[in-house]
Image: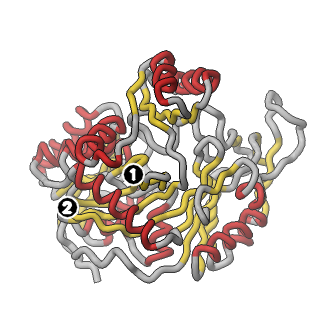
Amino acid sequence: MTERRSGRIAVIGGIVEILQAAHAVGLDVVLVHTPGGAAPGSERYCSEILEADFKHDYETVERLLVERHRERPFDRVFSLTENGLVPAARINALLGLGGNSVESVRLLKDKAAMRRRLAERVPHTAVRHRVVRSRGELFEFWEELGGPVFVKPTDSAGSIGVFRAASADEIRDGWARLRALGRAEALAEEFLEGPEYSVEGFVWQGRHHVVAITNTLLGDDFYELGHSMPAELPADVTGRIHEAVAELIDAVGLTEGPTHSEVRITPSGPRIIESHNRMGGERLHELMEMAFGLDLTRLSVTVPLGIEPLPRLSGLPSRGAAIRHFLPAPGRIVAIDGAEEADARPELRVRISPRVGDVVGPVVDGVTRDRTGAYVLAEGVDVAAAEAACARALDTVRIRTVPLPDGPGPDRPTSGASAAAVAGAGATALSTSGS
């Protein structure tokens, strides 16, 4: 049983589960979040919620937390959200609270810096890359490669702004979309062929422990349609993935906390796509709880603070778990059918944020990767059973829409994509099962 103890932490942004976990073990929690951005119910788990733009206004975040630290010291500042990671590391360093170094966190936040560090420390995993600041520079790099180029913003997550280009026209169109996002530079890389997996892990005292390797289901333009865990892979492939991620963690110098890495198995071996010192999005922490019975959110707080020891993380007995997104046609929602029926089944967790009357955009609009906020989580005796349960839910639940007056298509109700559509046209299953 987890020990309850008094203590005080600050949390920058992120999901409500970290607040719940800290509160459950008796910690006093101060939350810093963007104005109006805290999840509903957060106030139940916090003694104070401070509003500040932690992505763009570090100075305000620092001032607020240093003031409160003087009144009553914090034991640690935590963040499990992408844009809170560097601010948390900076304040921990400023206040002498420990945790991962600012350098390590910045190396993972800056994808180009991570590429350079890997090339220096683990040269056999190097990927040809270049930071480009114009369409012309991107075109020159593509010509040098003599093959497809993969482009992504240097500091974002969630597949926002990424594209693959194999022609001059695709470079022109992709760069225009990137500029429309307000990006002035990007990381261009050689395109890595092969199946993609995400790797969920935890670092403690500098040693990386892999919890799960997860199959990733990607759309045509690398939009994530779903995930399944654990991936069923040969032992030698699993071993090579473990080794590649451990080399990365050692190269950047992480010492503690959760990790989320994306890996492709290329003909020349595993290659790191990117990595983060946080848990993966897409409810992967919830999938780990369903598959392995592990609450990695809680461990992210309790283990660094010495509240509980690091449990066994690798080689655990498991069930299967999967997530799939509902894909309603763009337009105004006129009906949501079958959700209550599906959610009543014990193996399913159906989550639909939009309501009748809300407008949903395209699943992929070429500029933003816009998820509707509607998905299903499933568990089963194995991965195949969990994926089958997801497929049944996709065929049961219907989010019916009508196109907006100025939108394309006839003004008639349409429903979301079926399970067959998600697994077939418009989606590429890059591994044996469907971050």
Q: Quadrant of the N terminus?
A: bottom left
Note whether residue 161 is visible.
no
Residue 323, horizontal then vertical, whole percent: 59, 63
In this rendering, the answer to whether 183 lies above or below 40 is: above
Q: Tags 2 and 1 in contact by the CB under 8 Å rule?
A: no
Mark 2 → mark 1, Cα distance in angstroms: 24 Å
- Which quadrant would residue 289 be assigned to in this image? bottom left
Residue 312, horizontal then vertical, whole percent: 30, 78
Q: Residue at x 22, y 64 (%)?
A: 207
Residue 105, horizontal then vertical, whole percent: 26, 45
In this rendering, the answer to whether 35 lies above or below 2 is: above
Asked which secondary structure carries label 2, the reply is loop
Which residue is under mark 2? 206
Of labels 2 and 1, the one closer to you: 2
Report whether 385 appears left or right of 180: right
Residue 385, horizontal then vertical, whole percent: 64, 77
Which residue is under mark 1? 14
Looking at numbered disc 1 in the image, what kind of residue is underneath it? Answer: Gly
Q: Residue at x 36, y 39 (%)?
A: 111
What crowding class fits label 1: few (fewer than 14 Cα within 10 Å), some (14-19), or many (20 or more)? Answer: many
For the residue pair 39 and 373, the one nearer the viewer reads as 373
Looking at numbered disc 2 in the image, what kind of residue is underneath it? Answer: Gly
Q: Which mark is residue 161?
A: none
Asked which secondary structure carries label 1, the reply is loop
